[in-house]
């Protein structure tokens, strides 16, 4: 459970790190299963339902950038981890008694070439009727400054929703040259393998290229209070309710004003955030291709 101080810190700063939350056999299984799924990418030629591939991927030298949300349906282990009681108890302190999973993914950030993620707010991708919305991240590997930790801008969840558009289309990234943010104040979220990060959906965050010789894998889960409804709509109410993690569902969204920009018109490059961000104009983080020259 979180202390009063941790809850106050989260409300003020918009993030927390809980060291070594997942340990022992559970961590070993998480790592081993991920290794197996990545090994199966050998032979895959392009992005599909499960794999998001690095630009430098080839079938002979598989380079996976992300495992997509289908892992939560396809693998019992990942399905169960979303509902891990230790995690749920913490989430209830921040989001209230009833919680729904919005989505998630496993970002790989492989040794030496793992892609950067440009500055963004998750809220720009999936605004809801209220902002009791957050993401947790479980590090599969020890994470320090060298292997691309999640970087957050403290307190920005109290501020505006920044423009995530370029050339009139959503691109999933903030233009670093056209905003008032001083990125030198960013805080890295680090910890030993099994540590869990929490960040508010409106918090500005990103991460750099992994230039180290160690991978940095991060399992992200996006959770909402059950009465936070996506502003882009609910396609299938049964499917929506199948994502309940704990507590009671409702058909009465709680509406609390928060600054919103819809991710419309949609990105030129559909798919994951990496694909969306291909449309961004000015980049902040060095890419693998730039680092090589
Ligand atoms: O993997 C990372 O470092 C950042 C991931 C992220 O912010 C996202 O995928 O929305």
Image (cartoon, grey):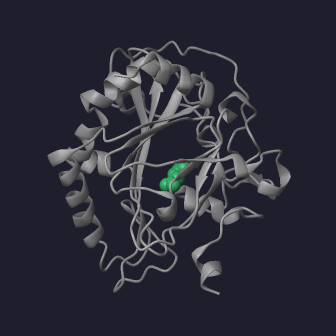
Q: Residue 234: in sight, yes or no?
A: no
Q: How many numbered discs, if any?
A: 0
Q: Which residue is drawn at 26% across and 72% down?
A: 39
Q: Residue at x 72, y 52 (%)?
A: 184
Quarter of the figure with residue 233: top right
Q: Is residue 91 above or below residue 261?
A: above
Q: Residue at x 42, y 69 (%)?
A: 110
Which image quarter holds the N terminus? top left
Q: Residue 279: in sight, yes or no?
A: yes
Decide if residue 56 is on the left or right side of residue 127. left
Decide if residue 246 is on the left or right side of residue 251. left
Q: Which residue is drawn at 42% across and 18% down?
A: 93
Q: In this view, does 70 lie above or below 110?
A: above
- Tell me where residue 179 appears, x and y as whole percent: 82, 48
Q: Is residue 177 above or below residue 258?
A: below
- Tell me where residue 82 appears, x and y as whole percent: 31, 37
Which image quarter holds the C terminus? bottom right
Furthest residue in direction left, as rendered: 25
Quarter of the figure with residue 127: top right
- Tell me where residue 87 appears, x and y as whole percent: 32, 30
Decide if residue 186 is on the left or right side of residue 27. right
Q: Nearer the viewer, residue 34 or 148?
A: 148
Decide if residue 93 is on the left or right side of residue 28. right
- Tell me where residue 153 appears, x and y as whole percent: 65, 42
């Amino acid at each position: 459970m979180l202390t009063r101080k941790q809850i106050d810190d989260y409300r003020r700063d918009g993030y927390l790190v809980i060291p070594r939350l997942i340990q022992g056999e559970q961590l070993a299984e998480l790592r081993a299963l991920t290794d197996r799924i990545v090994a199966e990418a050998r032979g895959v030629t392009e992005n599909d339902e499960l794999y998001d591939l690095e630009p430098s991927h080839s079938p002979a030298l598989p380079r996976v950038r992300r495992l997509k949300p289908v892992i939560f349906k396809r693998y019992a282990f990942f399905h169960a981890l979303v509902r891990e009681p230790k995690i749920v108890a913490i989430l209830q302190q921040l989001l209230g008694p009833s919680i729904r999973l919005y989505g998630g993914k496993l970002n790989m950030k492989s040794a030496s070439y793992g892609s950067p993620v440009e500055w963004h707010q998750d809220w720009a991708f999936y605004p809801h009727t209220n902002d009791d919305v957050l993401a947790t991240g479980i590090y599969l590997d020890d994470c320090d400054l060298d292997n691309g930790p999640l970087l957050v801008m403290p307190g920005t969840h109290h501020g505006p929703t920044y423009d995530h558009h370029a050339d009139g289309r959503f691109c999933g990234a903030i233009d670093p040259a056209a905003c008032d943010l001083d990125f030198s104040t960013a805080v890295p979220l680090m910890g030993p393998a099994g540590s869990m990060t929490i960040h508010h959906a409106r918090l500005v965050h990103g991460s750099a290229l992994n230039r180290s010789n160690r991978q940095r894998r991060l399992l992200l889960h996006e959770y909402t209070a059950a009465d936070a409804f996506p502003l882009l709509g609910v396609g299938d109410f049964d499917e929506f309710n199948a994502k309940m993690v704990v507590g009671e569902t409702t058909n009465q969204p709680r509406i609390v004003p928060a600054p919103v920009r819809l991710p419309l018109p949609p990105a030129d490059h559909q798919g994951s955030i990496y694909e969306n961000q291909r449309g961004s104009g000015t980049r902040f983080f060095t890419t693998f291709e730039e680092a090589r020259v």
